[in-house]
Every structure is written in C-alpha cells, then in structure tokens.
Image (tube, grey):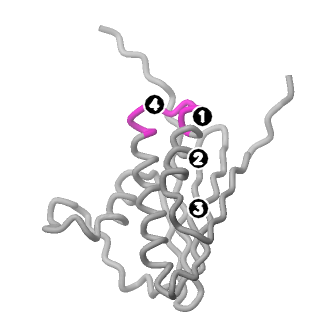
Amino acid sequence: MKKRKFPEQVFFRFKNPCYLRAIRDNTEIIARRMGFDEDQVFELAMIVDEAYANAVEHGSRMAGAAELEVEFLIFKDRLEVCVKDTGCGFDTSCVKIPANLRCLSSTRGRGLGLISMLSDSYELTSTPGSGTVLRLIKYLCAQREFVA
C-alpha cells in the first residue's frame, strides 16, 4: 500500500462564481473521507459556504471580474481551507465581527461571525485593490465512545 503524503491538496479556480454547490459538495466529501463526524461536516460546509459567498459578493464588485480560488489542504489531524478572490479588497481594521449572532437583527453580516465561531482558527487578509484571502482551520477530533 502506498504511503500518503501530507498535505494533500484539492484546488479549484473559478472565473464564474456560480459554483457554490460544487464547493459545498466537495467540502462535505473531503470532510467525511477524513473522518469528521456529521456535526463537524455540517460546520465545515457552513463556514466554507460563508467564505465563498463573501468572496463572490464582496470580491466581485468590479463588474464580476474577480477570480475565485478555493484550496483544501488535507493533513492527518486537520483540514485547512483557503478562499481567495482577486477583487477590490478592503481595510480589515474596519470589520466588526459579532461575538454573539443573536444580537444581529438581520440575517446579513453573520458570515465572519459564523466562521469565527465554527472554525478552530481563521485568518483574514485583505489589501484594498489586491483581493482578499480567508484561511480557516478545522481540527479532526478523535471520535469519542460513549458508554451508556
């Protein structure tokens, strides 16, 4: 049997942002194959959805000219996902990430809050005029056995 080399990489690049479903499906497939439990699969799918939707909405403001990249790095103990756009970028110091999503009266503006709460760690990098990169990490927790 061939020994696996880590990290393994799965990479997507889109000029047309209509591939949210493909990204979600691949996130779920990768997470399940890695051994994440169903709650973690759901969390991963949700945070990658949010990151991709934000890249589409905010990174494509220049007449839809942005290119989107999604990279999955598969390690033995974690999944790292990087969502990158080539859009207009922004000043990250102006972003307020809500600590509690219940305080929002709208369903808008929750993306980074969800990402913050459901990922084990994340990093948001953006420069006006240069696009945005969101890198998130979710660790694979050992499956627990419950004794009744």
User: Label 3: few (<14), some or many (≥20) within 10 Å?
Assistant: many
**Region in magenta:** 31-41
Label pair 4/1, CB-CB below 8 angstroms: no
> Residue at label 1?
34
Residue shown at 55% from the left, 82% from the top: 87
Three-letter amino acid code at the position of disc 1:
Met
Three-letter amino acid code at the position of disc 4:
Asp
**Is tag 1's residue or tag 3's residue first in the polypeptide sequence?**
1
Task: Calculate the distance from the C-alpha at mark 1 to the C-alpha at mark 3.
Answer: 17 Å
Residue shown at 66% from the left, 51% from the top: 73
> Residue at label 3?
82
**Is tag 1's residue or tag 2's residue first in the polypeptide sequence?**
1
> Residue at label 4?
37
Label pair 2/4, CB-CB below 8 angstroms: no
Label pair 1/2, CB-CB below 8 angstroms: yes
Task: Calculate the distance from the C-alpha at mark 1 to the C-alpha at mark 2.
Answer: 8 Å
User: Label 2: few (<14), some or many (≥20) within 10 Å?
Assistant: many
Say what secondary structure mark 1 lies in.
Answer: helix
> Residue at label 2?
79
Three-letter amino acid code at the position of disc 3:
Cys
The answer to whether residue 114 is above or below residue 28 is below
Q: Where the C terminus falls, by quadrant? A: top left
Residue shown at 15% from the left, 65% from the top: 103
Looking at the picture, how far across and down is residue 112, in whole percent? 37, 66
**Is tag 4's residue or tag 3's residue first in the polypeptide sequence?**
4
Looking at the picture, how far across and down is residue 86, in whole percent? 60, 79
